[in-house]
Amino acid sequence: MYESKIKDEHTELLVKAILELKTPEECYRLFDDLCTIREIQDLAQRMEVAQMLRKKTTYNEIAQKTGVSTATISRVNRCLTYGAGGYETVLKRLEEKETK
């Protein structure tokens, strides 16, 4: 069983709330209310970087295409390699949906 470093009563509510979302529009509405535009952009960039890293894109190519710093790319890569598996889970599922 995975032991999260961030799990507490506050994050539990957030996770439950996200799991209740049923449509992309509901997701956009919650994130509009919950986060700043910059926070959403940062999260979206990290997902894009993770996707590119899984496709073996080089750090330089990622930095040029996304404008993300190599420090952020390195952090995402570290999470892909040694993290909790969250990126891997969702990206694999998204790829499976795209190929169907």
Image: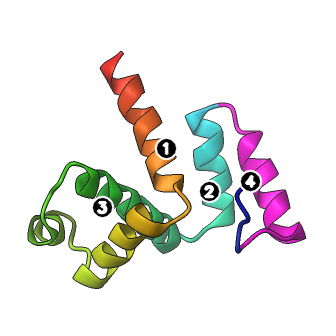
Amino acid on which disc 4 is placed: Met
Residue tagged 4: 1
Q: Residue at the spot x=45%, y=68% of the render?
A: 82
Residue at screen point 36% across, 33% down: 95
The residue sitting at 39% across, 64% down in the picture is 81
Q: Is residue 92 left or right of residue 18?
A: left
- Principal SS element in the magenta part? helix
Q: Is residue 35 above or below residue 32?
A: below
Q: Which residue is mark 1?
A: 90
Amino acid carrying label 1: it is Val
Q: Residue 65's x, y, as percent? A: 14, 63
Residue bearing the label numbered 2? 31
Q: Secondary structure at mark 2?
A: helix
Q: In the displayed structure, would residue 48 be above or below residue 3?
A: above
- Percent from the top left, x then y, of residue 11? 79, 66
Give the labeled residue for mark 3. Answer: 49
Task: Tell me the kind of residue under disc 2.
Answer: Phe
